[in-house]
Image (cartoon, grey):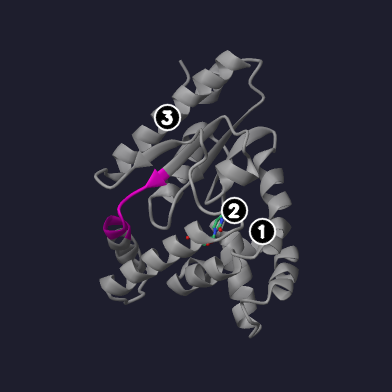
Amino acid sequence: MSDDPREDTSEGERFLVIAVDGPAASGKGTIAAGLARHYRLPALDTGLLYRCVGVLMRKAGEDLDDEAVATAAAATLTADQLEDPALRTRAAGELASRVAVHPRVRAALLEFQRTFANQEGGAVLDGRDIGTVIVPDAPAKLYVTATPEVRADRRWKQLAGQGEAVAYEDVLADILKRDARDGGREAAPMRPAADAVLLDTSEMTIEQAADAARRIVEAARARWLKAN
Ligand code: C5P
């Protein structure tokens, strides 16, 4: 028997779209990448889009609160720009969250994300509004969380591994600020979709979280197949 989970896909299942949302450093990126490998689906880390807009604005010396300029930057993005390692820094995360409050920036990035989600065969997308705004009809939705302290510890270790020396307290403060901004903004605030399954990874290893995520997707897929 093949271990390709897509081989038991019925005729009726055109694609599998998996939406993974959650706050910074919750583990959603690792979980999304694991699901993409398991189901052999392409993955998009949508945070990179906002990071890229923020970094472009900062490089050009633009005011991050200027919605028109940020929207113009968002409109010029191309997929190859998302490979830049500079987008993975702590500073880029903060810049991203600043430009992500602008409704027109979000609108300018919508089509790219929807086109990615609706490609043949399906896709895995992770972000803040995938299940609520980008693909509200995704058959499988996860909302990945962990306590702010656990998330700060993970992010701190990750940054240290990248050679970015920073105090744990500063990382925790960043995370709390980002949660408040992402959850409090008017445009597509970070929140679980009504039909998302919550996955709290605070007490889980990466393997346990990946297993739990797969079980959630399998259950969602079974439900979706039954209904369609
Ligand atoms: O996930 P990541 O930390 O890379 O996201 C950076 C920032 O981009 C988030 O704090 C959030 O403000 C914004 N974002 C968003 N919607 C998404 C993905 C990211 O608003 N779908």
Report the residue marked by disc 3: 216
Question: Amino acid type of disc 3?
Answer: Ile
Report the residue marked by disc 1: 106
Under tag 3, what secondary structure? helix
Return the residue found at the far left: 203
Residue 45 percent location from the top left of the image:
54, 52
Q: Of the residues under marks 2 and 3, which one precedes in the sequence?
A: 2
Q: Marks 2 and 3, Cα distance to the nearest angstrom?
A: 24 Å
Left or right: residue 119 compared with residue 6: right
Q: Is residue 75 visible?
A: yes
Return the residue found at the far bottom: 61
Q: Marks 1 and 3, Cα distance to the nearest angstrom?
A: 28 Å
Mark 1 Cβ inside 8 Å of ligand 1:
yes
Residue at position x 62%, y 76% in the image: 65
Mark 2 Cβ inside 8 Å of ligand 1:
yes
Left or right: residue 169 compared with residue 106: left
**Circle 2 Cα neighbour tier, 10 Å, few/some/many (<14 / 14–19 / ≥20):** many
Camera-near label (2 vs 3) is 2
Residue at position x 27%, y 56% in the image: 150
Point out the image quarter for the N terminus. Answer: top left
Q: Of the residues under marks 1 and 3, which one precedes in the sequence?
A: 1
Under tag 2, what secondary structure? loop
Q: Marks 2 and 1, Cα distance to the nearest angstrom?
A: 8 Å
Residue 120 percent location from the top left of the image:
69, 33
Number of the label disc, if any, that sits on residue 188: 2
Compared to 67, does 25 lie above or below?
A: above
Residue 40 percent location from the top left of the image:
54, 35
Residue at position x 38%, y 52% in the image: 26
Q: Is residue 84 visible?
A: no
Q: Which residues are magenta?
A: 144-151
Q: Of the residues under marks 2 and 1, which one precedes in the sequence?
A: 1
Image marks 2 and 1: residues in contact by CB distance under 8 Å: yes
